[in-house]
Amino acid sequence: MSGTARPFAHLAAENASTYRAVLGVFAEARERYALHLRPEDVHTELDRTGSSPGQEAVESALTQLVGWGNLRADPDTGRVTSVEDFHRARYLYQLTPAGQAAERALVVYEEALGRRGALQAVALEDIAEHLRALVVLLREDATDVARAAHLLAALMQRLESLAQNASEFLASMQRSIDLQDADTDAFVAYKDRLIEYLERFVSDLVTTGSEISGLVATAEDAGVRDLLDAVAAREAADLAPGEGTDADLQRAREVNRVHEAWHRRWRGLHGWFVGSRETPSQKDLLRGRARSAVPQLLRAVTTLNERRSGRSDRSADFRRLALWFAQAPDDEARHRLWRSAFALAPARHLSIDGETLTAREADPSRTVLPWAQAEPLRISPQFRRTGHHERRGRPARVEDRSARRRHLLQLAAAEHEQLLAARAELLTSGERRLSDLPELSGAAFPVFLDLLGRAVAARRPGEAGAVSEVTSADGSLRVRLTLLPGAGVVAVRTEHGTLHLPDGLVEIAEAAAGPAPGTAPV
């Protein structure tokens, strides 16, 4: 691109629509592999679409676009039949490299503005399928670098598409919630479809996402980082040689850049589906955002229904009251409106006396009588006698809550000790049958039920005998569950009752410093 080319200048010009239409004709012609166009060809195409500004305007636009660097004009000598035709200015026009780059940039910009994004459950399945193939390749033949490069490229491309579409979808969904007043009926109809869409994606994210987490850990144990180095070396072999005296140094930097790029992509995949104790995975964050969007939608619909049913809120009441004040004819009318609206009459010195309170307690029906039928209210003349409503004296002493704080700390410490004891009770020291577990205490049973639920949720539907391994929410315990096909139903006895579930092998142990192989942090 030359220093004088300004391919985006036509966007701010006076006849920008004409310039865009002309360049659109050239972009379509390039898709048909027609590189050159004559002015009459451009005019005919614009006239066919009903947007032609005229032959002279088209030629003027072509000349201006050549000046800006969007088009290149070459002499048209193909149809010269006389000397007069030779001396007459005739040109063939085509897009310059700068013009092509500008058109591609504008297309990407327009697509990005109009894109709503999507929560791609299919992308999760594709990522899992690519990881399964990668694990098989690592176990069978890790020297097939070409196939590994193809799998890794497809895997990273699918992950990039999933992340970008998810981000765009959540942003567009939030804009839809914020702009709910634009079309109430359309938003209410959109809500039902969106909630169903979110629930289906969250379900797929829990099942398929947990499997992907295990596959990522399995691939890392099988030596995927060495395979990344081999793929990066294969790609770096095609790098062009450098120039100058430091050509070797430049090439070494390029090779390091390629290696770091592949390892950075894999770290991104690990962070998206596995995460760490300090940083939750993007999968979990996305699940949280999707789940929190459902109550937001329901609250938005509730607000819309209240508005449509005629219910008013406090802000609407105050706006109506302000309008009444503005429309009042004089200050006297405004004072009456103030008294009627806020009932702030100067009667704060009135206070009910003890005899009246005793009479109301004896006959509660007096409090619901209309004021015209009720007995007169007897008030205390204390304010008139003393000039003060409150009793004078020393202020109330500040209450000492240190004993209550110590009590709360003792309760928290006791609860923590009870939790530690419950976890120690659950440790199995290896795999054990569920039917062989001893009776669980009331403190250990909720922890066991939470771990069991996480392990069952991490299993893929329909896989009998599959092993699932997860950690607790705080990462301190690790449970490994293997359901045995045809083992029957066992009863796990607790202080709260008996839990019936399919028999299998369970191992509960303290979690190691890092995530265990196949672990899906929850």
Image (spheres, rainbow, N blue to C red):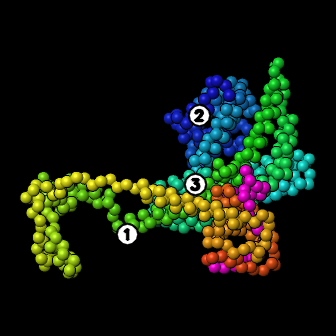
At label 3, which amino acid type do we have? Leu
The image shows residue 223 at horizontal and vertical percentages of: 85, 48
Q: Which residues are magenta?
A: 497-522
Label 3 near label 2: C-beta < 8 Å? Answer: no
At label 1, which amino acid type do we have? Ser
Left or right of 499? Residue 463 is right
Label 1 near label 2: C-beta < 8 Å? Answer: no
At label 2, which amino acid type do we have? Phe
| Distance between mark 1 and mark 3 Cα atoms | 30 Å
Q: Which of the pair 1/201 is nearer the observer?
A: 201
For label 3, count other residues whose C-alpha is less than 10 Å away and answer few (under 14), some (14-19) or many (20+).
some
Give the residue at x 61% y 68%. 443
Q: Earlier in the sequence, mark 1 or mark 3?
A: 3
Q: Earlier in the sequence, mark 2 or mark 3?
A: 2
Q: Which of the pair 322/230 is nearer the observer?
A: 230
SS class, disc 2: loop
The mark closer to the camera, 2 or 1, is 1
Q: How many marks?
A: 3
Give the residue at x 18% y 78%. 366
Q: Which mark is residue 8?
A: 2
| Distance between mark 2 and mark 1 Cα atoms | 51 Å
Say whether residue 456 is magenta. no
Task: Tell me the quarter of the picture where residue 440 sits.
Answer: bottom right
Tag 3 residue: 170
- In the figure, 191 relative to 258: above or below? below
Tag 1 residue: 309
The image shows residue 127 at horizontal and vertical percentages of: 75, 56
| Distance between mark 2 and mark 3 Cα atoms | 31 Å
SS class, disc 1: loop
